[in-house]
Image (cartoon, grey):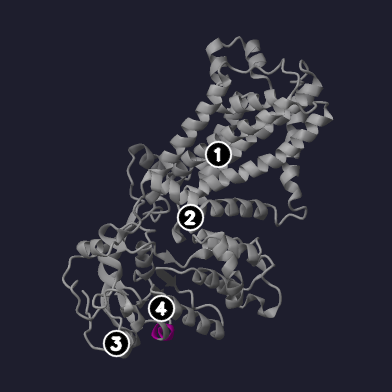
Amino acid sequence: MADQNTGTEASAPLPTVIADDVHIVYRVYGGNTGRGSATAALNRIVKRKPGAGVREVHAVKGVSFTAYRGQAIGLIGSNGSGKSTLLKAVAGLLPTERGKIYTDGQPSLLGVNAAMMNDLTGEKNVMLGGLAMGMSREQIRERYQDIVDFSGINEKGDFITLPMRTYSSGMAARLRFSIAAAKDHDVLMIDEALATGDRSFQKRSEERIRELRKEAGTVFLVSHNNRSIRDTCDRVLWLERGELLMDGPTDEVVRAYERETAR
Amino acid sequence: MSIVSETTHDSAVAMSAPPSPDDGLPAAELARKYGLAVSGARPSLPEYARQLWDRRHFIIAFSRAKMTAQYSQAKLGQVWQVATPLLNATVYFLIFGLLMQQGKDMGIRNYIPFLVTGIFVFTFTQSSAMAGVRSIAGNLGLVRALHFPRAALPISFALQQLQQLLLSICVLFVFLLGFGHMPALSWVLIVPVLVLQFLFNTGLAMVLARMGSKTPDLAQLLPFLTRTWMYASGVMYSLSTALEKTHAPKWVADLLAANPAAVYIDLMRWALIDDRSHIHLPPHVWVLAVGWALVVGVGGFVYFWKAEEKYGRG
């Protein structure tokens, strides 16, 4: 990890993501209080009011942190504590209600699965997913074999030329991660992706995350698997009910979190 | 509330702990010092156009993939890309040609190419509009997971329809030759017409994409609007002949003939059918064709860009 200090400014670590008192509020339509009738809907449209059907969910409440180059940061906390929401805001996919998020380059959320089509072959999906992430066609062609080898799809026969709907869920997840990890990201955010796949694939994924960090990037990892956090992250943010409860070295925070959840 | 630990730890060398000249610097200044930008801000229009250009391979790959995936579950597969427009034309021929005898004054030799051209060209605009209105609302997963200029989606869907039309045009050529309309130099004119109509369709798809992302209900309403538009554009009959019969005022006829769908349909017919006595082009037809393409194409792009940072939220 000392390699990041070989940069020009050895004393000051380079910040890649700065979150400054971030608040995120979701507005949920249709989570209404029973007035779902047609007349009520018409009434709302005529009055141009959001109406009683809109509920606000304050998902993240005043979170501040600064992430530096070369860090792998784990996000832990119980379900619904705002981890995924925070990552989406860092990726610029959700607006902040108050506060600002500054980023170096374009952070990417590991989400190529959205661009992939089940009716297409794995081969075509590698191309499509890569292009969707903003890779060039040459880059994808160059790394195509690495992606396929990394995913291990072809270990049990020529599966990459079959439509993705024939894959098992584990195979599909492996291919997705392989495509996403093929790009060099400045800031990569991974949301519970390592839970799928067999043990040997998880090992390879963790290895790849460490590599990405070495390539002077920052990695965020959301996981409920404390071991995978311990194996890959050097810093952990603990979120609870949208608030940042703790921010520190992995061992310390995970131990405190385990003490809390054991009770 | 945050508890930042100062404990040194082997695996935490890269922690924020080491003192640096940046300590105590407000977030905004720290961001400026290292050239960090606010996440999720809307780029300027030229920058947006440049980003879009960088994603051109994605746009093409996405439209091709949608095209391939469309009929992948059907046994006949890609044959449906040609069979669907063919069946469409047959249905309209049965109703308007045989049952209602719309084409008896222009003769079957002219009526069938006249009808088929009208249907294919109008379907191009209609399905671009339908795909456009759902392009954001129907792909929220993609919009919420990945970063790319959102205009890539409506453009991609319009491009998919263009590919569909090019296949339909092959069918149309067969019809034309079958009814003895020999290839002429004027056939070359379909290229500029298609380019202009594609521009118009893309702009329309972008306008509808923004509206549909805010009000998904529009997708329910749109089929009725496009059907009205179809009957008002003279797809199955000659607009001017039909209006003469009803003694409608001249300005109504002019207005209908100047509507973009009618302009592109009539230009295409004029280019392809050798007997032009039943095709009445409005005055300044090329000005209209270019005008509609530029106004809707460019206007739609700007209108779409204005809400770029809002797509897929809330």
How many marks are shown on the rendered structure?
4
The magenta stretch spans which residues? A226-230
Q: Find disc 1 in the rendering and name its residue.
A: B129
Rounded to the nearest whole Å, what is the CA distance between mark 1 and mark 4?
47 Å
Image spot of residue B102 (x, y percent): 74, 20
Residue B167 seen from this side: yes
Q: Find disc 2 in the rendering and name its residue.
A: B140
Rounded to the nearest whole Å, what is the CA distance between mark 4 and mark 3?
23 Å
The label shown at residue B144 is none
Mark sitting earlier along the chain (4/3): 4
Image spot of residue A4 (x, y percent): 34, 78
Please tell me if label 1 and label 2 are on a single chain.
Answer: yes
Residue found at the far front of this picture: A8
**Kind of element beneath mark 1:** helix
- As shown in the figure, which amino acid type bears the numbered disc 3? Glu
The dominant secondary structure in magenta is: helix
Rounded to the nearest whole Å, what is the CA distance between mark 2 and mark 4?
33 Å
For label 4, the crowd category at 10 Å Cα-Cα, with few meaning under 14, some 14 to 19 and many 20 or more, is some
**Mark 4 or 3, closer to the camera:** 4
Q: Is residue B173 above or below residue B76?
A: above
Image spot of residue B52 (x, y percent): 47, 49
The residue positioned 27% from the left and 71% from the top of the image is: A66
Image quadrant where one finds the C terminus of chain B = bottom left
In front of the other: A133 or B280:
A133
Q: Is residue A57 above or below residue B131?
A: below
In front of the other: A99 or B8:
B8
Please tell me if label 3 and label 2 are on a single chain.
Answer: no
Q: Is residue A178 above or below residue A45?
A: below
Q: Find disc 4 in the rendering and name its residue.
A: A214
